[in-house]
């Protein structure tokens, strides 16, 4: 008989996957038997199941700011104290940029090969544009307000008020402040640094304890979130965009299981079977929440508890990854832009497709790690390659499903990055 910590962790991961499967199966069954228009089903999905999921999400988002600040400040202070920050930082950023660029390229190649835009008839196009024109207008307005990827976005990384950045969940600004705070803390004399580090470690431990309590609700929250979406999705929408969904989800699956699994094996010496078995809870949380930010506490716990990544490296790499490393988002942007170009009858040249890859990487960095956070930035990419922005309405109806799927390689890519950096530093156990 075994009931140690490792067994309890694996049991928790199993229950989260059970919740995901039960929610999906129940939602699909209800959608098929009574239909998404049934008022009782809609009431239960939106007022009961969704609220259980919302409670779980709120608990996770509540703890994101203290986890990001304490883990990153402690990680940087530890690395800066050993004078390895520049080396580790260069490895981390370089790895994130390369894998994100590869993901965007994979998405574009998949659309070029299978041409899902050719399957959309003029009648389907007109119906989809009419159904989602209000939502598309909202996203276009958000894109205009954000200004896209520009010098202003770079300047906004430096917060005028770090407390306000934390209150607004502006993770780019919070990360910048935490980096400077950690570097300065690492340079303090030992007698002054020790009590500060002790306080930060205590705050981090408190945060992880609250995360543990929140994760006890994970099976119910995950089941509620997935049930709502699967119960209310209409089958006709899936059939109308079947080719697009097949290419988008297929490319995301290749990025997740072939590319990231292969990179973990090649550069971190972690076999794909071990990687995916030990990150079950991480993948289930990412899929159900559609948020890299909400999944960050689980990512940190998985890296340190399951793979024994040192706390300072995990605390440095993973918060950066949750904001800067968006493999799935960049791939999705490439797929959407090329798909909408095909539907519009535009044939993008090779040089324009290279531009799409570059813009997908840059805008993925600026995408908010929350559900639907990349949509306004996709509008910016579309405008750069002269695709009418209102065409975004074609894919909005099924975006939630693709959003759930693309969050999984986002967070798995963060975990693989931490494993690779730790292995390169000689700090990952066999």
Image (cartoon, rainbow, N blue to C red):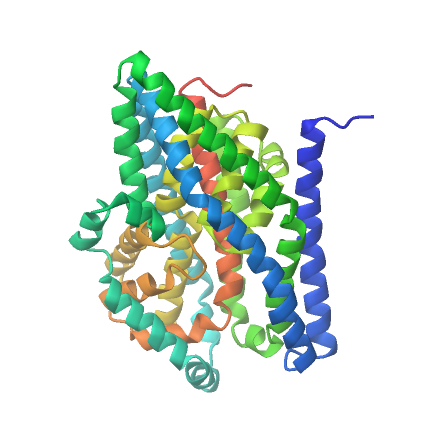
Please tell me which residue is depicted at 68% across the width and 74% down the height of the picture: 31
Question: For the view shown, which residue lies furthest in the left direction?
Answer: 151
Position of the N terminus by quadrant = top right
Question: For the view shown, which residue lies furthest in the right direction?
Answer: 1
Classify 297 as above or below 32.
above
Classify 82 as above or below 75.
above
Name the side, left or right, on which 168 lies relative to 233.
Answer: left
Return the x and y of residue 360 as percentages of the image width and height.
32, 55
- The residue nearer to you, when weighing 155 against 43, is 43
- The residue nearer to you, when weighing 420 against 375, is 375
Position of the C terminus by quadrant = top right
Return the x and y of residue 332 as percentages of the image width and height.
42, 58
Please tell me which residue is depicted at 47% across the width and 42% down the height of the picture: 296
Whether residue 345 is visible, yes or no, is no
Location of residue 12 (image quadrant):
top right
Location of residue 383 (image quadrant):
bottom left
Classify 224 as above or below 120.
above
Location of residue 226 (image quadrant):
bottom right
Classify 184 as above or below 319.
above
Count of number-bearing discs: 0
Return the x and y of residue 281 as percentages of the image width and height.
61, 43
Whether residue 173 is visible, yes or no, is yes
Name the side, left or right, on which 225 lies relative to 168.
Answer: right
Please tell me which residue is depicted at 69% across the width and 78% down the height of the picture: 40
Please tell me which residue is depicted at 47% across the width and 44% down the height of the picture: 63
Return the x and y of residue 417 as percentages of the image width and height.
43, 34
């Amino acid at each position: 008989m075994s009931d140690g910590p490792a067994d309890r962790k694996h049991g928790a991961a199993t229950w989260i996957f059970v919740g995901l499967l039960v929610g999906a199966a129940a939602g699909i069954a209800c959608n098929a038997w009574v239909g998404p228009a049934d008022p009782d089903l809609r009431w239960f999905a939106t007022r009961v199941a969704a609220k259980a999921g919302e409670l779980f999400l709120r608990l996770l988002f509540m703890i994101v700011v203290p986890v990001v600040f304490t883990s990153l400040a402690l990680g940087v202070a530890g690395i800066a104290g050993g004078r390895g920050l520049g080396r580790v930082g260069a490895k981390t950023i370089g790895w994130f940029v390369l894998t994100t660029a590869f993901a965007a390229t994979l998405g574009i190649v998949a659309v070029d090969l299978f041409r899902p835009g050719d399957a959309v008839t003029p009648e389907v196009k007109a119906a989809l544009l009419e159904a989602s024109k209000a939502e598309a207008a909202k996203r276009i307005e958000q894109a205009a307000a954000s200004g896209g990827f520009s010098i202003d976005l770079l300047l906004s990384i430096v917060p005028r008020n770090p407390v306000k950045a934390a209150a607004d969940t502006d993770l780019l600004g919070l990360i910048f402040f935490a980096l400077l705070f950690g570097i300065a803390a690492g340079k303090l004399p030992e007698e002054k640094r020790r009590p500060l580090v002790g306080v930060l470690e205590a705050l981090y431990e408190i945060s992880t304890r609250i995360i543990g309590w929140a994760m006890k609700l994970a099976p119910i929250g995950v089941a509620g979130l997935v049930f709502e979406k699967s119960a209310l999705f209409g089958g006709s929408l899936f059939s109308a965009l079947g080719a697009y969904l097949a290419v988008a989800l297929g490319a995301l699956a290749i990025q997740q299981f072939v590319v990231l699994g292969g990179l973990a094996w090649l550069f971190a010496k972690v076999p794909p079977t071990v990687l995916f078995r030990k990150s079950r809870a991480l993948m289930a949380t990412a899929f159900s929440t559609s948020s890299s930010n909400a999944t960050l506490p689980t990512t940190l716990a998985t890296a340190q508890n399951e793979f024994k990544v040192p706390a300072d490296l995990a605390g440095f790499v993973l918060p950066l990854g949750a904001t800067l490393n968006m493999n799935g988002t960049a791939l999705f942007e490439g797929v959407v832009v090329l798909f909408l170009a095909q539907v519009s009858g535009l044939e993008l040249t090779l040089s324009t497709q290279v531009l799409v890859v570059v813009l997908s990487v840059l805008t993925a960095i600026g995408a908010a790690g929350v559900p639907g956070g990349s949509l306004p930035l996709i509008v910016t990419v579309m405008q750069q390659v002269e695709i009418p922005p209102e065409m975004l309405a074609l894919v909005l109806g099924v975006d939630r499903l693709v959003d759930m799927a693309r969050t999984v390689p986002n967070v798995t890519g963060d975990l693989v990055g931490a494993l690779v950096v730790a292995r390169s530093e000689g700090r990952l156990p066999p």
